[in-house]
């Protein structure tokens, strides 16, 4: 019974930043973009991206130990990198600083015109590229 409740709580948590819809193959990238664009200026700057990254990390960290296990990583996170890539020190779990590192690299990858901010177009095409892989 208890574990069922935990699962439900987890599902609710993950629904916010990343998870649930992704598993159904219908992740709403525009909605996620709007949520990440905190000041509503239509682009995501690095500070907003980092804020979101921290949020996603803690939402994905289901057992609240401060690290993401491979399972937590897969369920809570939208990154085009696999777990072993993120686990830089190879201890079998991803810390917040490892996660930030991956997401920083992702930011640069998605910012295809190099203007230091992410437009909706950049995010959508990065997402579609990933989805079509
Ligand atoms: Ca913004
Ligand atoms: Ca690690
Ligand atoms: Ca850009």
Image (cartoon, grey):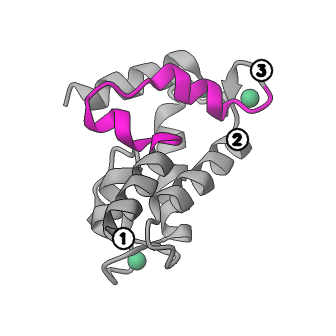
Distance between the Cα atoms at labels 2 and 1? 35 Å
> Residue under circle 3?
41
Task: Indicate whether residue 26 is drawn in magenta.
Answer: yes
Tell me the tag on residue 17.
Answer: none
- Determine which residue is flagged by label 1: 2
Q: How many marks?
A: 3
Of the four image quadrants, the one with ligand 2 is bottom left
**Crowding near pointer 1: few (<14 within 10 Å), some, many (20+)?**
few
Rounded to the nearest angstrom, the CA distance separating label 2 from label 3 is 11 Å
**115 left or right of 130 in image:** right
Q: Can you tell which of label 2 and label 1 is closer to the viewer?
A: 1
Q: Position of residue 90 (x, y in %)?
A: 32, 80
Q: Which SS class for mark 3? A: loop
* Residue 113, image quadrant: top right
Q: Which badge, 2 or 3, is on the more N-terminal residue?
A: 3
Picture coordinates of residue 29 (x, y %)? 46, 25
Q: Is mark 2 within 8 Å of ligand 1?
A: yes
Residue depicted at x 54% and y 31%: 111
Q: Residue at x 34, y 44 (%)?
A: 80
Q: Earlier in the sequence, mark 3 or mark 1?
A: 1
The residue at which mark 2 appears reads as: 48
Residue 117, image x, y percentages: 66, 30
């Amino acid at each position: 019974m208890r574990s069922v409740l935990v699962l439900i709580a987890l599902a609710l948590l993950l629904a916010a930043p990343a998870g649930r819809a992704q598993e159904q193959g219908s992740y709403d990238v525009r909605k996620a973009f709007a949520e990440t664009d905190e000041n509503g200026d239509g682009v995501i700057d690095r500070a907003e991206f980092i804020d979101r990254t921290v949020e996603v990390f803690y939402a994905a960290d289901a057992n609240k130990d401060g690290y993401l296990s491979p399972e937590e990583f897969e369920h809570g996170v939208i990154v085009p990198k696999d777990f072993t890539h993120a686990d830089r020190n190879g201890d079998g779990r991803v810390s917040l600083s490892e996660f930030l590192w991956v997401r920083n690299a992702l930011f640069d990858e998605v910012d295809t015109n190099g203007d230091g901010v992410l437009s909706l177009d950049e995010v959508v095409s990065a997402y579609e590229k990933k989805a079509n892989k």
